[in-house]
Amino acid sequence: MLSIVFLLTTASGLAQTADLVVENAQVYTVDAAKPKASAFAVKDGKFIAVGTDVKKHIGPQTRKIDAQGAAIIPGLIDSHVHMRSLGDMLETMDLRGVSSIEEVARRVKETAAKLPKGTWIRGRNWDQTNWGGKFPVAADLDKVATEHPVYLTRVDGHAGWGNSLALVAGGVTKASEDPKGGQIIRDAAGNPTGILVDRAQAMVSRKIPALTDEQVEARLKRAAQECARLGMTSVHDAGAGRQELDAYRRLIAKGQLPVRINMMIAGAGELWEEYLKKGPEIGDKLTVRSIKLVADGAMGSRGAAFFQPYSDDKQNSGLLILQKEYIRDVAKDAVAKGFQVATHAIGDKANRTALEAYGEALQGKKDRRFRIEHAQVVSLPDFKLYADFAVIASLQSTHATSDMRWAQDRLGPDRLLGAWAPRRFLNAGVRIANGSDFPVEDPNPFWGLYSAITRQDHAGNPPGGFMPSEKLSRVETLKSWTFDGAYAAFEEDKKGSITPGKVADFLVLTKDVMTIPEKEILTTLPKLTVLGGEVVYEKK
């Protein structure tokens, strides 16, 4: 256990007495001017000294942490998350890793037995590639839920699976037309099967009773606590609305938000128009200066937009949800009012569309830090467009090691060269910011570090790593989860490294992730998560 004691000695002649001093540590600062240290001092929530001279900042009331040689890193910044969805998942049914339709049905049956008739049954994270690749159908759920509408969201969030009662509630019939940017999966006779892709999901999801403000607040609080437990001190919430915004403000007022939030407004609606009028909101715990757009779907549900058809689905090139002109017009408004644009783009066509739209809106203004979220499959010439327009690639390392099972089948060998390619981005001079996209992936950031460094899954497969030329070093990986995440939110002068003047967000780790065998990174956790000099999580 770490020892935290109050010093009883008296200090004299100090210009600044610290509230907290940490000594006997292996500190990885992510500060190029001083990459390593053994101690640091904190006052008023900020680092005031880093190095061996911290003793001069010790006073009678200074708290002291003897780290006992433990590794300390800056607080991790997840640059792409979905906080409400994580809270929802923690409160409902998590189907991650379930390997059969029958097991999903069993869990739905158990849930139905506990709920009043007519109550909606929700869950997420099913993945048909875990049971051979065949999409499930409504009838699989009808067998176990005859009195409850059921709607289960796919792991990528871009498809949903409903039973017949859910389809009836949503008015989804043989005569229903596919909405723009969405698809109703049908059988040979044209009947809906129960799978809705991208914008077609709204046909059912809008019929599900909305959560109350209190429920949303409780779920965001639970998600934030999970972030603190896992070592995240800042997250970029990739698409939230007024209900989440108000809940964050209430949690801050109550002192119950143990993580800093950079919130992206979900699409160009009423909330976006309000912010365009008043400008960005920049705060200590909550910042709103970005808009999140969605250009296409996901590869797992074959909704990502490509120039050529999927290699394993020759009649399908995916769904381009937004056209270039729309993205360009939103981006022009953002440029004029000081906002950032972050666009979800997975397929090569979606990436090109977003990049060209950005280029037309920016017109040489390269300081806007526009982002593309996921940036999963990029045509090789388009890496230069990223660099030319100074676009940040917001990547999720665990996507590569989750999707590698079917990557070549979906893409073929040529497109694979520009897929899940952090090293190629860095070589092109493009800044990358790392994240998890939780709850699409597990929220544990150390799994993300492991994936970036090894390009392997938890079992160590494949030997040598998936596309091993795309591996990152440990130093590069840590930077992508700290300083570069701060840069992607215009906050590199405030956080992202253990540097005097920056907020004192840091982790004391159970293992030294910079030196231990790679496999042990997976089981690393924080002993302490510290936000602004205050412990927000302590491992028992």
Image: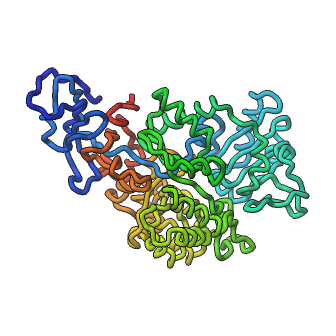
Q: Position of residue 430 (x, y in %)?
A: 41, 67
Between 490 and 482, the one nearer to me in the picture: 490
Residue at coordinates 31% horizontally, 49% vertically from top-left? 497
Q: Is residue 508 visible?
A: yes
Residue farthest toward the left in the current orientation of the protein: 13
40 in relation to 432, above or below: above
Is 12 left, or right, of 107 in this rendering? left
- The number of numbered discs placed on residues in the rendered structure image is 0
Residue at coordinates 44% horizontally, 34% vertically from top-left? 258
Between 325 and 406, the one nearer to me in the picture: 325
Is 481 left, or right, of 80 in this rendering? left
Q: Position of residue 221 (x, y in %)?
A: 53, 33
365 in relation to 485, above or below: below
Q: Is residue 65 visible?
A: no
The colour mode here is: rainbow
Q: Quadrant of residue 183?
A: bottom right
Residue at coordinates 23% horizontally, 24% vertically from top-left? 5
Is 63 left, or right, of 405 in this rendering? left
Between 522 and 39, the one nearer to me in the picture: 39
Residue at coordinates 91% horizontally, 58% vertically from top-left? 175
Q: Position of residue 320 (x, y in %)?
A: 68, 66
Look at the image and tell me in which quarter the N terminus lies. Answer: top left
Look at the image and tell me in which quarter the C terminus lies. Answer: top left
Q: Position of residue 280 (x, y in %)?
A: 49, 49
Residue farthest toward the top in the current orientation of the protein: 8
